[in-house]
Amino acid sequence: MPLRTPGSDAAYRQTNGGRSTAQRSFGRPEPQQEAFRPVYQGQAWPTEQPQYRPAYVPPPPLDWHQQQARSYASEPQKLNRVVTIAALVALVIGVLAGAGAATAVVALSGNGTPIAQQPDPPVGTGADPKIRTGSVSAVAATLLPSVVQLKVEGSDNSDATGSGFVIDNAGHILTNNHVVAAAAKGGSIQVVTNDNKTATARLVGRSPAYDLAVVQVAGLTAPSVQFGRSDQAVVGQDVVAIGSPLGLAGTVTSGIISAKNRPVTTGDDTGQASSYISALQTDAAINPGNSGGPLVDMNARVIGVNSAIATVRGSEEGQSGSIGLGFAIPIDQARRTAQQLIATGKASYPVIGASVDMMFEGGARVSAVSPSSPAARAGLRVGDVITSINSDPVDSAEVLIVAIRTHQPGEAVRLAYERGGRSRTVTLTLAQQIG
């Protein structure tokens, strides 16, 4: 791939099996002495026999219907007790549940103030309370003032646009080499800040090997970024990309780290201006013009320099938009290179002093060995196939070059290679080359 409500108790008694007054006295005539009814109605039968008077008729024994009536008459109190107990239980459960919820909220809010007494907190803690800390909008608010758009014109009428970001208080801006390369032999570089101010920049230095460059604007008032560590990036973590895709300055996209240590080659097809990157892969949308912009974590710290995208074969215009495969130079490497460029205008990269066949698969086959080089001193010969570096497998020349460039000149590496069907190992010290 190329890279680019139930009713009340009363209602219950009337409707749910209860009987009306007429129904409860059905089958038994009403007592004849109406004046005496209030004395015994609803009370237990008297233990002493009353003295009879003429025309006195003793109350009859209670029949089944009257017994049922008494039972129903006492039912509201029972129901009320049940309802009261149930309400108390519900109240206790509600209080316990409410206490649990309050505990959780207090734990999240980090204070012990009762929730009812707490004021409504702002969404964020920064200058704009609508922005939630750690959100994409918070990252954008922090980084956008530090990201610039680059407009480059070459002496041969070629032009380019890209992105960059301020890395110190001296006005130095880090970007990609392929963004500013047109101005390397004459031309101009214009920097447009987030507040739409334009200034002319000078080219401080560039490194085609790492596809990095530094330009400077005198008196630049834009703030510098904070650096993170790309070696601590993890697959799946959230990231934000900021830049000027297709000339649309101040564009913010978000995604995740899709992979680490992805061997990526950028540049032309001749190999003379190719860059080899052990890249951070992201699905944050990156398009032409994003090059040189920062890839940042959710703490608004730069962890990479957006540099390349994968393209679909057969693209009619030679390049396509984002297909979810973007690549960034790890900031750990980019910082070292930027420091060299600022100090000397040049940058170095490690080499073993041997050329490898870019078309060979199944390893990195040596095609040439430079005299007095680390490869020559280690005994490597033309035709040897390097299969691993520091125990990491090598299945192509590109993988070997990318792996070597993650190191520094002067570091020792251990190579495993095959010669004549036999496996051998050797340790060599990396030399340096400027570029």
Image (cartoon, rainbow, N blue to C red):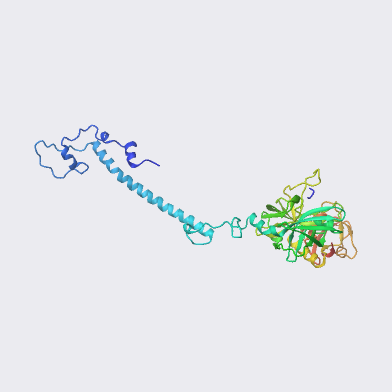
Q: Tally the marks.
A: 0
State the image coordinates of residue 194 (x, y, percent, origin top left).
71, 57
Q: Is residue 188 visible?
A: yes
Q: Residue at x 21, y 38 (%)?
A: 62
Q: Nearer the viewer, residue 176 or 87?
A: 176
- Left or right of 362, for residue 75: left
Q: Nearer the viewer, residue 207 or 133?
A: 133
State the image coordinates of residue 393 (x, y, percent, origin top left).
77, 56
Tell me where residue 184 sits by quadrant. bottom right
Q: Nearer the viewer, residue 401 or 227?
A: 227
State the image coordinates of residue 234 (x, y, percent, origin top left).
68, 57
Q: Residue furthest front?
A: 197
- Left or right of 40, for residue 383: right
State the image coordinates of residue 290 (x, y, percent, origin top left).
75, 53
Q: Residue furthest right?
A: 371
Q: Is residue 426 visible?
A: no
- Left or right of 47, for residue 101: right
Q: Residue furthest left?
A: 54
- Left or right of 273, for residue 334: left
Q: Residue at x 66, y 57 (%)?
A: 141
Instruction: Using the image, determine if residue 77 lies above or below residue 181.
Output: above
Tell me where residue 429 sits by quadrant. bottom right
Q: Nearer the viewer, residue 81 or 153?
A: 153
